[in-house]
Amino acid sequence: MELERVDAYRVRIRKKGNMRVPGMIYADQKLLDQISTDRSADQVANVAHLPGIVRYSLAMPDIHWGYGFPIGGVAAFDMDNGVISPGGVGYDINCGVRLLSTTIPEGEIRKVKEKLVNTLFSNIPCGLGSSRKDLKLKKKEAASVAEKGARWAVEKGFGTQRDLRFTEENGCLEGASFHVVSERAFERGRNQLGTLGSGNHFIEVGYVDEIFDTEKAATMGLHLHSAVVTLHTGSRGFGYQICDDSISKMMTAVQKYGIALPDRQLCCAPLRSREAKDYFAAMASAANFAFGNRQIITHWIRESFASVFGDSPQNMGLNQVYDVTHNIAKFETHTVEGQKKKLCVHRKGATRAFPPGHPEIPDEYRAIGQPVLVPGDMGRYSYVMTGTEQAAETFYSCCHGAGRVLSRSRAKKIGKGRAIERELADVGIYVRHQGKWTLKEEMPEAYKDVSDVVDVVHKAGLAVKVAKLVPLGVIKG
């Protein structure tokens, strides 16, 4: 694999052997040195072998090793000759981030942060086996969630129509079909709606610490030293099982259609095939489950704030800024060699970043561009950005977070004997968690410094910084 530095923030992987296109990694030298500690750059090159790939196999600066595709990978495929691959979406389908603004001053949160975090922890199930018995779905209801997404939740009283407008795809990915979802996936997901889950999923209460663009921040309802809430979760066991089921089918499809792969984890099927259509319909079902999941949790976040502050969500300005997905494949129109083309864009650990004027973002944001939410680790900070026209080179895609620099097993070894909860408390962050090893697996050192990642995409022109958010209280699974 030959790396060629294009500029301070772009590194090209030269086309070699059976690669159909070059690779492109967005990284400065510091991040490239971190990326080189695993084989994720090899995965970027491997993705470039897939049929119908357009322009480049891309990787954001938060890239790290994943199943088939690297996490932080982006690839677009031609509708006639291209493929769809479950490895390009990942197991947690439509894992995504939702941000709520408030009019509550930071100081008021500090006074009650322990009570607030404890209330959230009590109201919202989290952890590996978390479930909501009162939301255990019958098959007909599960089908409705899979095909309606967040709209199902709003119709049931969990949130408002405004929430849908400020959610990617209005909270519903078209093309879902519950009929292609396995019984096992239904059973795994039926009682997990409205649950946070485990691993890197979280709810974070923080505040706006710094504003880089006052006009854009104000448009989003973000004001200096006002409180915010960030939610990060996905499709839970429902999406995991759909991915697992689909990989088995795609392994067979690779043989059926004679697709040569450098890594069997890149198993895929031609976009025109029945296997591809079934996968997309199942994946969209999981994506809609995730939209519904975040919508219901949002409602319970508002109820928790109302309980602690004794005021209505409306009076506290608990409005949704935006909801973005970062594990998904979607059909989008992009300009390729001067022509508009419909493509299947895979974003795995990467966020959509539409520019100002794009018709698929809310009217309120049309002048500033789509909000891009980039959470960091639980001990430092996160960022809000907006998409740019320059991001056309990445099919309007951007980084999705800090990106792991330590595996979970390595983080547990390094964290052995340390009181991570106390370390966070010493810097003013109150944490509640469910899993035995969660805090060690998710400690700040396990992740790259998100400011390094954000600086690269900002300076490369893929997105621009709007605000920095700092945590005060965190819930982990």
Image (cartoon, helix red, strand yellow):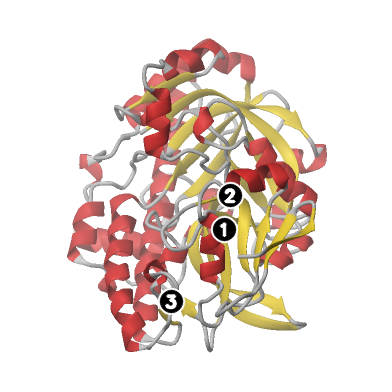
- Closer to the chain start, of discs 1 and 2, is 2
Q: Amino acid at mark 1?
A: Ala
> What is the x, y in percent for residue 417?
37, 16
The residue indicated by pointer 1 is 41
Q: Are marks 1 and 2 in contact (CB under 8 Å)?
A: yes
Q: Answer with left or right where residue 28 lies relative to residue 257.
A: right
> What is the x, y in percent for residue 345?
56, 70
Q: Amino acid at mark 3?
A: Leu
Q: Answer with left or right where residue 361 lies relative to residue 204.
A: right
**Mark 3 crowdedness (10 Å alpha carbons): few <14, some 14-19, many ≥20:** some
- Closer to the chain start, of discs 3 and 2, is 2
**Mark 2 crowdedness (10 Å alpha carbons): few <14, some 14-19, many ≥20:** few
Could you say which disc has been placed on residue 261 in the image?
3
Distance, label 3 to label 2, CA atoms, is 23 Å
Distance, label 1 to label 2, CA atoms, is 7 Å
Quadrant occupied by the N terminus: bottom right
Q: Secondary structure at mark 2?
A: loop
> What is the x, y in percent for residue 91?
37, 57
Front residue of this view, candidates 20 and 96: 20
The answer to whether 239 is drawn above or below residue 411 in the figure is below
Foreground label between 3 and 2: 2
Q: Secondary structure at mark 1?
A: helix
Front residue of this view, candidates 460 and 8: 8
Q: Are marks 3 and 2 in contact (CB under 8 Å)?
A: no
Residue 358 showing in the rendered view: no
Distance, label 3 to label 1, CA atoms, is 16 Å
Q: Amino acid at mark 2?
A: Ser
Quadrant occupied by the C terminus: top left
Residue at 52% of width from left, 87% of height from top? 81
Residue at 41% of width from left, 49% of height from top? 234
